[in-house]
Amino acid sequence: MSITNRFKLQWILGITSSLASARSDDISYFWIEIIFGLQKVDRIVGLSRRPKVFHFGPPCWSDMTKPMDPLIFQPGPRPRTVRGSNDSIRKVPSDWVLLPPGDATLTRRVKKAGEAWCVQQRKGRRVFSLGIWAPKTTIDRLKRQLEEERSTEQYQKKRQSDERRRAKKQTEYVEDFTLAVRQFLRFHTRHRSLGERLARKVARHATPVGSGTVARTQKIPIERRAEAAVIAWMRHQTTAYDSMVIPRVRGKRREVRRMLAARSRQILDQYRTGAAPSPACPLYRSLSEDSAAK
């Protein structure tokens, strides 16, 4: 590198490091690229790849304009108190009120408006929202704004359109999920009607929005969702799982569920052949009882 280029490089690195200490490498990289070109940048700076985002000013400026994330607490031991992550107890300010869950739009706006405390409670693996503590004036103001927006004709049309879109999407998903269940069952033609009843029952139980079942997750393919939903339905409908007294020992409940899942798969395998089902089969008995009840 020539003396002139070396001087330019030192000058650029000095200027950019004073602009943003947290991400000076990105800014330095940008200005070096302008002067020296792409081919020389990696050799000069020693970076293996180009950064994805370039910053043109101190990152703290943009961070200061972002609203603060609401703090998350657990319910406190007394009314109008919350418990922090370090087990400390905080008293809710006197001019704050609790906004209960249920209105997602209002909740988002309250979070963005300023300081707020989210109250959550864990039950097993799931976390439930108990509401948000925030200044009463903020909640009342945002409620009035939202009511005015929702009273317009334009909003009503948009809401109806959204409801039709969601209903169509849900109908299509139920059909796709039912098909995935049928494909997992693969019952023999002799037991086709039994397989249809089982597929419809599993889909009806597992697919409703907000049900929290495995069918609603997007983390695994629909084929695995269908298999897990069938096994879960059989665990509750064809075994004594719900009435079992399982020791509160780590891993014991998972062990019991694996054992029952293996038994359920053995039952399903019987219906994949042309053999006549046994009247004592728990799956056959469960589906027959439901059919007779109708």
Image (cartoon, helix red, strand yellow):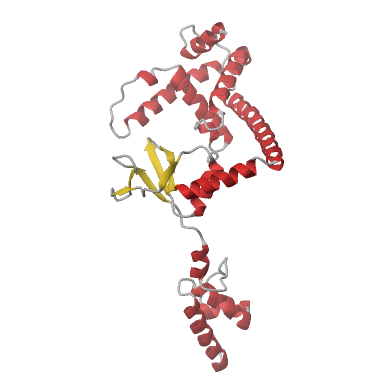
Q: Who's the residue at 55% across and 39% down the image?
A: 218
Q: Quadrant of residue 52?
A: bottom right
Q: Who's the residue at 44% across and 22% down the image?
A: 235
Q: Who's the residue at 39% across and 20% down the image?
A: 242
Quadrant where the N terminus lies? bottom right
Image coords of residue 144 (percent x, y):
57, 45
Image coords of residue 87 (percent x, y):
28, 48
Q: Who's the residue at 57% across and 23% down the image?
A: 204
Between 77 and 146, the one nearer to me in the picture: 146
Q: How many marks?
A: 0
Image coords of residue 275 (percent x, y):
55, 11
Which residue, as the protein is rendered here, is positioned at the far bottom? 3
Residue 153 visible in the displayed image: yes
Image coords of residue 255 (percent x, y):
35, 29
The vertical placement of 18 against 206, above or below, is below
Q: Is residue 118 left or right of residue 2?
A: left
The vertical placement of 38 against 147, above or below, is below
Between 257 and 188, the one nearer to me in the picture: 257
Q: Is residue 57 left or right of residue 79?
A: right
Residue 42 visible in the displayed image: no
Between 100 and 183, the one nearer to me in the picture: 100
Between 30 and 75, the one nearer to me in the picture: 75
Quadrant where the C terminus lies? top right
